[in-house]
Image (cartoon, rainbow, N blue to C red):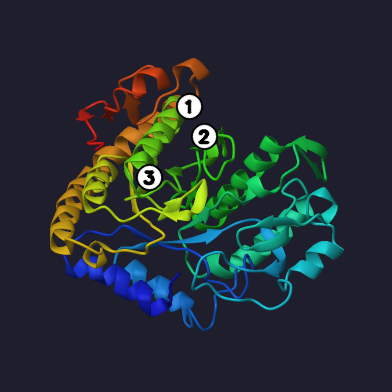
Amino acid sequence: ISTAQDTYDFVDGFRQRDIPVGAVVLDSPWETAYNTFVPSPTRYPNFGRMVSDMHDRGVRVVLWITAFVNTINYDLEPGGDIYQGPAPNLAEGRLCRFFVNEGAVYNWWKGTGASVDFFNPRARAWWHRQQDIVLDQGIDGWKLDFGDSYVTTPTVSTAEGEVPHQRYSEAYYRDFYAYGVERRGADFVTMVRAWDESYQYPGRFFARRDHAPVVWMGDNRRDWVGLIDALDHTFRSAQAGYAMLGTDVGGYLDRDDRNLLQEVPFDPDNFARWVAVGAMSPFMQLHGRGNFTPWTVPTRADEIVALYRYWSHLHHALVPWLYQRTEAVYAHNRTAAPSDLRSVVTPLGAGPAQWRDDWRYLLGGDFLVAPVLN
């Protein structure tokens, strides 16, 4: 939960401490309402200028989004914005029948809303015109959260008829990625879930590999259980052929994902070990519900800053090498049989039964990574 000034302070705080930054992700709330694509004039009064300033710093800008257009708005995260009434783009979408399941509404963590029909060409065009507001201001990617899980029917009624829920999910991720690349070029990215098993939802893959340039294992607890869960999801995703993998460094949840009333305290040892795992992953991302930077952690901040500087410099130095390895994986996976898929991450164990005793993996075939797990 951020503002323009906080974004400048966040990025510049790393740079002032000699910690390299490649991208900043603006999570919600950044809009006038959820999924309107219009930057909030109070939180981000000169959005285009901020994006340009980030680019001048060598920093890409990625925006959180889902496909829900709300009838009622709320935010389960403290400090979020309160939007009055339905989203301003809801009435037109309903009138034109641009939502799945005949416009049925579903509860999700930002309110109650209807989800866009990505099988309807007119709905896609309507959705793309709204995205143009920020694409034209130079953003570099979308963080596509798993709102598709909250469309709870096993099949989804679309302009093409009834489709399996999984097919609807894949259409959601495919369309955001394809249109972003069309408008902003081949370097445009989407961040999506690969294998995910959280909030009591059964584990599954979300986007197809070819529509998932960056995947992250999200919403793990910020403790040793969470780190092992993140590695388990990483390994499952790697075996399925996803290339650019990462986790929320330090874990995301400060509460138990199966009992949100139970707090998970911050553990500097766990955080420090997770920083190392993040650095030795293709994608290194700091993102937590506690909203920490290395210099604002509750304890041992000086030590954490020094560790974070070391590991992030190592990760940054690996970027050209990781880029080559990742491009090779993408090229291979486009033609490979399912039994011969590759990833930049290769677990030493053959499957979950072996991983439980051995969470080591190869990074790019050249580095042996042995995470510290307690």
Task: Tell me what residue is drawn at x 34 percent, y 30 percent.
Answer: 345
Q: Decide: few, some or many residues near mark 3? Use Cα within 10 Å; few <14, some 14-19, many ≥20.
A: many
Disc 1, disc 2: CB below 8 Å? yes
Question: Residue 354, can we see it?
Answer: yes
Q: Secondary structure at mark 1?
A: loop
Question: Residue 351, can we see it?
Answer: no
Task: Tell me what residue is drawn at x 57 percent, y 41 percent.
Answer: 200
| Residue labelled with disc 2 | 209
Decide which of tag 1 and tag 2 comes sooner along the chain.
2
Decide which of tag 3 and tag 1 comes sooner along the chain.
1
Q: Secondary structure at mark 3?
A: strand
Task: Tell me what residue is drawn at x 25 percent, y 64 percent.
Answer: 298
User: In the image, is 4 to the left or to the right of 275?
Assistant: right
The amino acid type, in three-letter code, at marker 2 is: Arg
The amino acid type, in three-letter code, at marker 1 is: Ala
Residue 247 image label = 3
Residue 240 image label = 1
Q: Position of residue 63 (x, y in %)?
A: 49, 62
Disc 3, disc 2: CB below 8 Å? no
Disc 3, disc 1: CB below 8 Å? no
User: In the image, is 245 to the left or to the right of 272?
Assistant: right
Q: Choose between 127 and 309: the one closer to the eye.
A: 309
